[in-house]
Each structure stands twice: as structure tokens, then as C-alpha cells.
Amino acid sequence: MAIMITDECINCGACEPECPNTAIYEGGVEWTWGGGTTLNEVTLEDGTVIDANEKQEPVSDEFYYIVTDKCTECNGFHEEPQCAAVCPVDCCVDDPDHRETEEALLAKKALMHGE
């Protein structure tokens, strides 16, 4: 599964620098697939290929957010999700809408980091 940030977020920013995949962004900030990864291009679910540095729309305009498709729950880097470990208000939680196996999360990590 991925981690999500709830609307209890106080926008402290403690989580953002902890993410090894650069999957966490401040509310209103555009994100890229390439940021924090070795990706040069990405094939979307519909088969469209895009430049990994092409800016994407923010997931949230109000709170810090996690790009689900870049989140590996820190698998392959740490024993636990670092965003959840440092969050002072415990708003980095499991996302029940995005469940993935450990193998899938490790495969995602390998893809994003050229392993």
C-alpha cells in the first residue's frame, strides 16, 4: 500500500525531506516523476509516454501530499515509512485505497532508481 497525508496535516514539512523517492510535495506545488528518481520517461496506464521531468498537477492545494505512484513505503530504504515516523500529528497513514505487496513496492523502487 502507499501512505497518504490526511487533512489533519499542519503543513510543518517534516515529512518532505525524509522521502527517499521524493514522493512528498507541499500543497499547491507541481510534481514530476523524475524528481528524486533516475526516470527519464514514464509510460502511463493508458500507454502514453511522457517526459519524467514534465510537471504534473498538484494532488492537493492545501496540504502536503504524497504521489501514490512514487510511494514505496520506504521499502528497500528503511524499515518503516519515514514520513510517518517523523510526523508530529500522525497524519501520514496507510492509504486504504492503494494496497500493494512488498514485492510490488520493491519493484517500483527498482524501476524508479534504475536497479
Image (cartoon, helix red, strand yellow):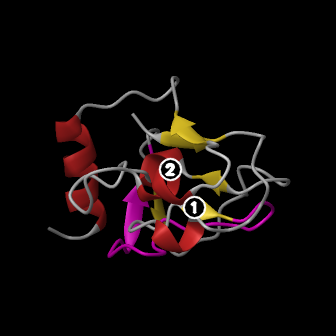
Examine the rendered structure and indicate whether residue 90 appears above or below residue 33: above
In which quadrant will I find the N terminus?
Answer: top left
| Residue drawn at 46 percent across, 29 percent down | 98
**Which class describes the residues within 10 Å of circle 1: few (<14), some (14-19), or many (20+)?**
many
Give the residue type at disc 1.
Ile
Name the secondary structure under disc 1.
Answer: strand
Image-quadrant location for residue 27: bottom right
Q: Nearer the viewer, residue 17 or 22?
A: 17
Residue named by callout 1: 24
What percent of the width, then of the height, locates residue 52? 47, 70
| Residue drawn at 59 percent across, 55 percent down | 87
Q: In this figure, what is the number of numbered marks? A: 2
Examine the rendered structure and indicate whether residue 92 appears above or below residue 42: above
What percent of the width, then of the height, locates residue 110? 20, 60
- Residue 109 lies left or right of residue 115; in this view the side is right
What percent of the width, then of the height, locates residue 73? 37, 48
Image-quadrant location for residue 61: bottom right
What's the magenta bit mostly, secondary-structure-wise? loop
Examine the rendered structure and indicate whether residue 14 appears above or below residue 57: below
Label drawn at residue 84: 2
**The magenta stretch spans residue 21:** no
Q: Say if residue 112 shows up in the picture.
A: yes
Q: Where does the magenta region start and end?
A: 26-44
The CA span between labels 2 and 1 is: 12 Å
Image-quadrant location for residue 4: top right
Instruction: Select label 2 or label 1 by which is in front.
Output: 2
| Residue drawn at 64 percent across, 55 percent down | 88
Give the residue type at disc 2.
Ala
Name the secondary structure under disc 2.
Answer: helix
Residue at the limit of the structure toward the top, as seen here: 96
